[in-house]
Image (spheres, rainbow, N blue to C red):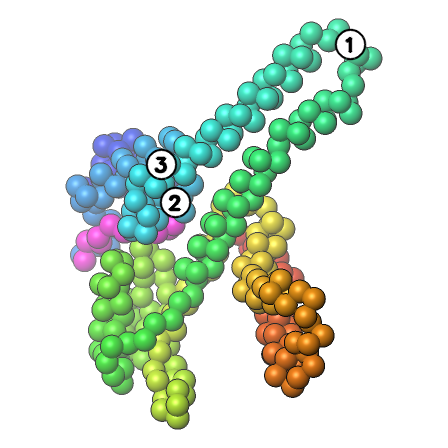
Amino acid sequence: MNIKQAQQFSGISADNIRFYEKQGLLCPARNPENDYREYSEKDLQTLKLIRVLRMLDMPLEQIKAVLFGRITLSQAAGAQKERLEARSRQLLEAIRLCSELVTLSGLEEVDPDRLLLQADSSSPEGFFQGWLHDYRRTALAEHEKRFTFLPDGAVTTPQEFSAALFRYAEEHDLELVVTKESMYPEFTIGGIEYTAQRNYTAVCGCPVASIACEVMHPEDLEPTGISPVRRRVQKLLHLLWLPILFFLFLLLTHRGQLGGLFSSWEGWLLLVSLLVLIGVMSFRGWLLFYNENGKTGKK
């Protein structure tokens, strides 16, 4: 069926169907003669499921995770239930404050400080949960932007490169389509365009091949509904969480013994290595934080 028929039977507008395709939730076949989209019965059922989950206000990233099997529908529904319950508590508090304001006869009876205190006292839980939810979305998007894997066999020809990509997709239950076969191939996963290259790393003196994949249009994976500042801060934390966690672990486990820890050259070597790691990742985070604005401004 064509997009007009898919719109009719799914109840989703053609513009939204195209948007879901761009977000990687749907990947219909193309007619080889005219390159028009051809929607199957499976595509139609997918559209209907997307419509149901969007009616529950489930984020697109979570719907995509369900469709590609990264999480179960039960897990996604449970997480959405918790978000809706938190939102419901906030709405009930807002309704209570509105009811209180209705009883006032004029502005002179309003005590803004008391009302702000009441409102703030009910918001930290919702804010914290919302921040964690946005961070999970940001971390998932960053993970999907670039990934590396070790091929099972040699990768010396474009055909072997494509075969390695297909094996990776099969192992991870991904819908991968190679659009350009070469030693720098291009492919799509769930409608998102990627490019790949082969790298070599010396391990015990022997070169080990790996395949590094990176999304071609990073803006396609940016979580929606998150302010640019919050998104950049969360990306920075995503880059720095490991060295920060290790440093805190070091402080906690050697509390009161730091003098003894750094009295030997091994301790100082550990400290310098840790500081170099934090410095490198902080520089990467700084570049991301201050250069991200130029990318997001194009959207």
Circles 2 and 3: CB distance less than 8 Å? no
Q: Pinpoint residue 178: horizontal percent, then vertical percent.
A: 27, 67
Q: Residues within 10 Å of mark 1 (few under 14, many from 20)?
A: few
Tag 1 secondary structure: loop
Provide the residue designation for mark 2.
Answer: 62
Provide the residue designation for mark 3.
Answer: 77
* The residue positioned farthest toward the right in the image shown: 108
Residue 151 left/right relative to 292: left
Q: Pinpoint residue 249: horizontal percent, then vertical percent.
A: 58, 64
Which residue is found at the position 38% from the left and 50% from the top?
23
Of mark 2 and mark 3, the one earlier in the sequence is 2
Provide the residue designation for mark 1.
Answer: 106
What label sits on residue 250 in the rendered view? none
Of mark 2 and mark 1, the one earlier in the sequence is 2
Tag 2 secondary structure: helix
What is the magenta range?
A: 22-32
Q: Pinpoint residue 202: horizontal percent, then vertical percent.
A: 41, 88
Which residue is found at the position 46% from the left and 30% from the top?
84
- Residue 131 sits in quarter: top right
Residue 47 left/right relative to 266: left
Q: Pinpoint residue 251: horizontal percent, then vertical percent.
A: 64, 65
Q: Amino acid at mark 1?
A: Gly
Tag 3 secondary structure: helix
Main SS category, magenta section = loop
Per the model, the C-alpha gap separating discs 2 and 1 is: 46 Å
